[in-house]
Amino acid sequence: MFDGCTQIQREERKPLTKDILYFISTVDNYNVFDDLTLDVETNLKVLCEVLEHCKDKDITFNFISSWFVYGKTSYLAAKEDAICRPTGFYSITKKCAEDLLISFCETFGVKYRILRLCNVMGAGDQKASRKKNAITWLIDELKLDHDINLYDGGSHCRDIMHVQDVCRAIKLVCDKGELNTIYNIGTGNPTRISEIVSLAHHYLKSKSKINNIEPPEFHNQVQVQNFWMDTSKLQALGFEPKLSTEFIVKDLCL
């Protein structure tokens, strides 16, 4: 998908090309319980160490962010210029990283794009868990015929897109997207978690029992009930997702 890209070593901070695609990040809001500074160290300190090598250079910094930065917004579908109210250390530091990047680029004349990804789904995530990529983890539990618990019966909505479509969208924005702006990467459509789980349960002929439970207090503090994006800017570049929710679920069931 990204033929010709130059990958750098994990601990390297100096970019090797003028076009940077930056993925370095933590992945969930739960680090606060085990390592209070991990989100700050990873999402902010490491970013600053990389930016130190980008001053006054002909660089385009494409920063991969997350829909989590919107937080508990009351405006759906969420547009790129919506007021963000992130909750949780991961979400807050991702939004802070965006703001630091914008300030740095304006100070030193560096070009940037910020890409806010929806829920990215597809087979192959070996680290899916209750904390990270929970929908994939639930489907993995269905494969094992383990009973699963859905918060509020899975009534909450998310903007989901297959990883292949996400990669196409990222490449399109990096190739043709406007500079010094933010792009939502998603389908622009809400999908209920219960719909995804029910489809997977059907395809797998799973014997799992699906339970309805109340979410824990921390989940209510850091998560939103419903979320989907306005993807007009992405669509204006000519992007259309190719892979349906049904395809995504079948892929996760393999």
Image (tube, rainbow, N blue to C red):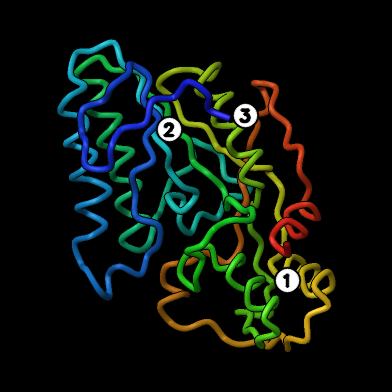
The residue carrying mark 3 is 234
The residue carrying mark 1 is 197
Q: Quadrant of residue 40?
A: bottom left
The residue carrying mark 2 is 114
Pointer 1: residues within 10 angstroms few (<14), some, or many (20+)? many
Q: Quadrant of residue 229?
A: top right
Find the distance from the CA under tag 1 to the CA under tag 2.
31 Å
Q: Are marks 3 and 1 in contact (CB under 8 Å)?
A: no
The answer to which of marks 2 and 3 sits earlier in the sequence is 2
Taking 36 as reference, is 90 left or right?
right
What SS does tag 1 mark? helix
The residue that appears at 66% across and 38% down in the rendered structure is 165
Position of residue 110 relative to residue 97, above or below, is: above
The answer to which of marks 1 and 2 sits earlier in the sequence is 2
Taking 65 as reference, is 198 left or right?
right
The answer to which of marks 3 and 1 sits earlier in the sequence is 1
Q: Amino acid at mark 3?
A: Leu
